[in-house]
Amino acid sequence: MQSEMNPNTDKPVLEVKSLRKAFGSLEVLNDISFSVKHGEVVAIIGPSGSGKSTLLRLINQLEQVDGGEISVCGQQLCSNNEAGNAVYSDQETMRQIRLNIGLVFQNFNLFPHFSILRNLTEAPSVVLGKRKSDAEKKARQLLDKLGLADKAAAYPWQLSGGQQQRAAIARALALDPEIIFFDEPTSALDPELTGEVLKVIRSLAEENMTMVVVTHEMAFARDLADRIIFMDQGLIIEQGTPDEVFNSSNERTKLFLRRYHE
Amino acid sequence: MNYSVVIPYLLEGTVTALKLFALTLLLAVPLGLLVARLRAIKNPLVNLPVKFYLLLMRGTPLLLQLIFFMYFPPFVLGISIDRFIAALIAFSLNYGAYFAEIFRGGIDSIPQGQSEAAKVLGFSSWQTFSKITLPQVIKRVIPASANECMTLVKDTALAQTIGVFELFRAAQNTTSREVSIIPIFIAGAFYLVMNSVVAAIFNRAEKKLSYYKG
C-alpha cells in the first residue's frame, strides 16, 4: 500500500487485490495485487507466459476471475465470497465498468467490414446511443489527433500495421474511457512502425491519460512509465519506479532485464 | 410437337418449382442460422438433439424425407396434409441442416478477437452477432451457399415423387403425351436458366462485398 494515498485526490482508478486465475490445473495468476492512480502510467513487463495478458483479460472481462477483487473507479467488478471464490457484480455494474475501460489489442482487431470512421463511431452510437453527427465529429477529432485524418473513409486492410494500431487506439478513446489497457501494442509491428505507435501512447501520457501497458519495449517502459510491475510465473516479483526496477537487486528481475540488454 | 401448348405447360411447372425454391430458402436460411447458434451451445441437452437432427437430415435421402412428411401426418397422426406443404417441410428441414453447417463453419472462421473487441467496446452479445460477426460470416459463406441454392433448384424435381406437379413432372407428362424426349431437354434448359440467375445473384453479392478483406 502506498502510504501517501489520499482518498480524495489519489483515489485509484484501478484496484486489484489477491487475484487468482487457473486454466485447469495450470495456475496462471497467483495473489496479484496492485493499484493504478489517476493519470498514472504503469508498464507491466515479464517473460512470455508470466500471466501479463491474462491479467489484462481478467480486468477487461474477457476471462473469468477465480478469486480476488477488481474495482474500477470505485465500482466493484468482483469480490470474494466466504469460500474465497470470486463473485461478480450485477450485469449493469459490469457494463458500466466495461465502458470505463479501453483495451488495445496486440492484433488491433479492427472491424474489417467497417471504414476507419465507422470503427470509431459504431460503439458510441450503438452502445452509448450518441447521435451519429456527434459520434462522427468526435471520431474525426480523434483521427486528426492521431494523424489519420485522411484515412477516415479507408478500410482497415488499406492501412499499414502502425496506422491500424493507431486507429484501434482512437477507437478505444472514442468511448472516453477512464483507463486504457494496452496488450503488447507493438508486438505485431516492425521497429519502424513501433515508433509511431509508441509516440501516440507517449502523447496520451502527456495528456494525463491513465494507462496500463503490457510491453516488451524496455526502453519505452523505462522512459515513459511512472511505475513498472515485473511479473514472472503468475506472480508480481516486484513493482516500483523505473529506476528501482531497472537497478533492482532481485536476482529474477536482474536476469530478465539482462537478457533484454544483450 | 405443338410448342405453343408444351411451353406454357412447362412454365406452369416452373412456377411451382420456383415457389418451392423461394419458400424453402425463406424457411431454411433462418432455421440454419438458429441451428448453427444452438449447435454452439455447450449444454448437451441442447447440443445432442441438434446433432441428431443434423445427422438425420444429412444422413438419409431427401427422397425418403419427402415420403415421410407426405405419409406420416395422414397415416400416423390422422391429419391430411397438402402435397406442396409436405414437400416444403421436408425441403426446409433438409436444407436447414446443410445451411446450419455452412453457417457454423462461417461463424467459427471469424477470429475470436472480433467478438472480444466488440465486447470490450460494450456491445451486447446480440449487437456483436448482428453487427460484427454476421456481416463477416455472410461474405465467407457466399460460395458454399451458392452451391446449396443451385442444388436446391435442381432438387425441386424430387417433389414429384409425392405427386407435386413441378417442372420435371410437367416434362415427363409431355414426353408421354407427345411421344418425344425433347420436353425433358427443354426442362433441362429451364433449370439451367434458373441457375444462371442464381449464380449471377451470388456473383454480384460477392463483388459487392469485395470492398473489404478479412
Image (cartoon, rainbow, N blue to C red):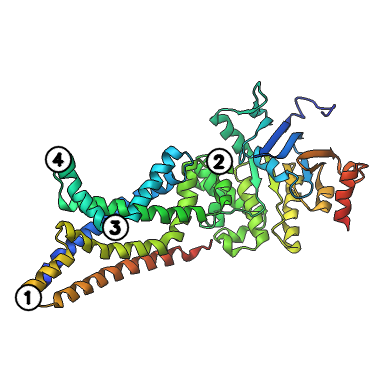
Q: Name the residue under label 3.
A: B61
Residue contact between numbered discs 3 and 1, judged by CB atoms under 8 Å: no
In the image, are marks 4 and 2 on the same chain? Answer: yes
In the image, are marks 3 and 1 on the same chain? Answer: yes
Which tag, 4 or 2, sits closer to the chain's start? 4
The chain holding disc 3 is B
Q: Mark 1 points at which residue?
A: B178
Which tag, 3 or 2, sits closer to the chain's start? 3
Q: Name the residue under label 4.
A: B78
Which tag, 4 or 1, sits closer to the chain's start? 4
Residue at the spot 34% in from the left edge and 68% down from the top edge: B199
As helix, strand or loop, the secondary structure at mark 2 comes to: loop
> Which mark lies nearer to you, 3 or 2?
3
Tell me where residue B33 appears, x and y as whole percent.
39, 49
Q: Marks 4 and 1, how far apart in space? A: 39 Å
In the image, are marks 3 and 2 on the same chain? Answer: yes
In the image, B115: left or right of A40? left
Location of residue B207 by image quarter: bottom left
Callout 4 environment at 10 Å: few (<14), some (14 to 19), or many (20+)?
few
